[in-house]
Amino acid sequence: MRTFPVIAAAVAVAWLSAAPAQAGDGPVGRWRTDNGNLEVEIVPCGAAFCGTVVKVLANRSMSGNGAMVAADTRSPLGMTILKDLVSSSAGEWQGEIYNRENAKTYSCRLSLDGPDQLVVRPYVGLPMFGKTLVWARVAAPAERN
């Protein structure tokens, strides 16, 4: 009976190390934007979190006829679109998000809605004047194989 706790602990450690980042890691991980255009990797950046575009999946615009109509014509790959995200309350982070379609930066609030959904709310002034977007967690490159 004494070996059961040791085996259970070893199994728990193995399972937790294989699991993707969860709420305890904050928004850390790789996320697909709501429109399916980009994969953004959120990582710690000093005392805050930041998010960088690591993969371009499509180039659909949120406005117009579907053709990309971005005011910022730079390639999104490698672009930091989330920055200065700091914890504002339990399970919620505030910072800034950059929208390359209009080349503007907005205040932003993030929260996890389960382990695989990130609620992103860009806004001007107050969060009630924003738009809610839901990003989906994607597997890290090593987990895709």
Image (cartoon, rainbow, N blue to C red):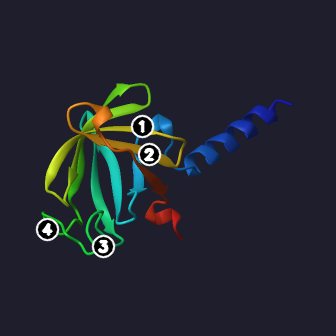
Q: Tag 2, which secondary structure?
A: strand
In the rendered view, does 127 fall on the left or right side of 89?
A: left
Cβ–Cβ under 8 Å for marks 2 and 3:
no
Looking at the picture, does residue 97 appear above or below residue 52? Answer: above
Q: Tag 3, which secondary structure?
A: loop
Disc 2 from disc 4: Cα separation: 26 Å
Q: Residue at x 41, y 55 (%)?
A: 31
Q: Which residue position holds label 1?
A: 111
Q: Residue 69, position in %: x, y?
A: 19, 69
Q: Which residue position holds label 2?
A: 118
Q: Tag 1, which secondary structure?
A: strand
Disc 1 from disc 4: Cα separation: 28 Å
The amino acid pointed to by label 4 is: Arg
| Mark positioned earlier in the residue sequence (2 or 3) | 3
Disc 2 from disc 1: Cα separation: 6 Å
Label 2 neighbour load within 10 Å: few <14, some 14-19, many 20+: many
Which numbered disc, 4 or 3, marks the residue closer to the eye?
3
Q: Is residue 84 at all visible to an observer of this figure? A: no
The amino acid pointed to by label 2 is: Leu
Q: Which mark is residue 74?
A: 4
Q: Residue at x 34, y 57 (%)?
A: 40
Q: Residue 35, position in %: x, y?
A: 38, 62
Examine the image and state in which quarter residue 54 appears. bottom left
Disc 2 from disc 3: Cα separation: 24 Å
| Mark positioned earlier in the residue sequence (1 or 3) | 3
Q: Tag 4, which secondary structure?
A: loop
Q: Which residue position holds label 3?
A: 66
Label 4 neighbour load within 10 Å: few <14, some 14-19, many 20+: few
Q: Residue 86, position in %: x, y?
A: 29, 32
